[in-house]
Amino acid sequence: MVVSIGAAGMNANMMLDINPARINHLLRLYTLSLEDLAAKISTKTITLERLKEWINEEKIPLSTLKKIDGLFEKGLEWYSSPRAIPESKATSIFFRKDHFNASLNFSSRKIATQFEEKTIEIRTLAGFLDYTPVLPKKHTIKDDPQMTAHTYREQFLQAQAQLLEKKIIKKPTSEYDYLKNYLRTIEEFDVFVLEFVENWNVKEKASFSGFFLAPNFIILKRQQKYIRRELFTLFHEFAHYLLNIEEIDALNNETTAGTTAIEQWCNDFAYHFLSGDYDETIATMPLGTKQNNFNRDTVETIYTQTRLSYSAIYTRMYVHKKLSRNDYEGMLKHINDTIAREEAEKKAHAAAERQLLKEQGKTPRGAAPKPIISQRFTEIVKQNYFRGNVDDVHFCQLMNIRPEKMDVVLYS
């Protein structure tokens, strides 16, 4: 008999019926062994031997199940369901592909899985509205990435101008404004862009910057202070969308040449999209040396007039042989060292502020950054709500808002 796990006052040592196939499914999904799972939840009473015994007997203590669910966050009832989970290519990118351009830790796989589940729900809601995405012509890496990027850049700028004219977006005055506008504009190409913001104090940070899920979903990790890197990732993943090739990428900077022809094409597309006509400026500048301060004035002009980062600009200078290898590597090291130092200083300052407030008996405050919400997703959820396909509770869950915020979202 399966005990109702939601019952209050249950003994932590109560043995609950489970479906071992579901735990094995999670182990395969996250490429974990039973030994790995035991190590993650290990206590004096939870050992590998006991875990094997419980799974074999299809019964497990409530306290242990809670620890397992603390990792996977599926809900306790999920583990007892007798329904089989099909491990087909349709269920997860981790079953569709064996290797990724990011070295994926447990946290990365967990976040990717959560977003893939969200995309499935979005497709379901879109189906209720008979919505079918208008996908672009499929490109191949035989297409010139520069010409392709310029074609879409022209269309993108036209779409952005229309959104500005209609006051759907505002003229940007900050890097964050540019990010919001780019995310909103790119959705005019029938792409859903979903962003997530990682908490500053997580023990294991996600090891990817973005990924593309067919047919039309891009997921981005907020780069916080270094938004230009997120923009590069956005258009790198948009290139995957044009190629219709799924991938999870670790684009911590825009410097490394693609490990494959596909990655190089996506990198080149993103660069040319963001650089516009300034690639010609880089191609024709003199060799950067200490004597001419490595063309710093021209670099600053390009940085100001485009949304390219310094790393991307110096990389293209190196590609065009306008920097020696030693100077190029020195530039990147200086940039990355500066970023690391600023991040360390920011964390130290935040920790000192929290400690001071604690000593003063005050509760630290400050709203955590919120992800930019896909407007296309919002409209689909709202239409489903008005048609009765989504109730109040589900609406708030989908939009990640409190009930008192419903009217603001619904009628904005």
Image (spheres, rainbow, N blue to C red):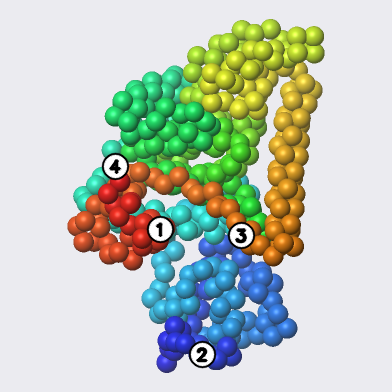
Q: Nearer the viewer, mark 2 or mark 4?
A: 2
- Reading the image, the residue beneath label 2 is 10
Q: Which of the 4 quarters of the picture holds residue 116? A: bottom left
Tags 2 and 4 in contact by the CB under 8 Å rule? Answer: no
Q: Is residue 43 left or right of residue 125?
A: right
- Reading the image, the residue beneath label 3 is 106
Q: Earlier in the sequence, mark 1 or mark 3?
A: 3
Tags 2 and 3 in contact by the CB under 8 Å rule? Answer: no
Q: Secondary structure at mark 1?
A: loop
Residue at horizontal 76%, vertical 39%? Answer: 341
Where residue 113 appears, x then y in whole percent? 49, 58
Q: Nearer the viewer, mark 1 or mark 3?
A: 1
- For residue 133, the mark is 4
Q: Which of the 4 quarters of the picture holds residue 374? A: top left
For disc 3, the neighbor class at 10 Å (few under 14, some 14 to 19, many from 20) is some
Q: Secondary structure at mark 2?
A: loop
Disc 1 residue type? Ile
Disc 4 residue type? Pro
Q: Nearer the viewer, mark 2 or mark 3?
A: 2
For disc 4, the neighbor class at 10 Å (few under 14, some 14 to 19, many from 20) is few
Q: Earlier in the sequence, mark 3 or mark 4?
A: 3
Tags 4 and 1 in contact by the CB under 8 Å rule? Answer: no
- For residue 401, the mark is 1
Q: Nearer the viewer, mark 4 or mark 1?
A: 1
Q: Secondary structure at mark 3?
A: helix
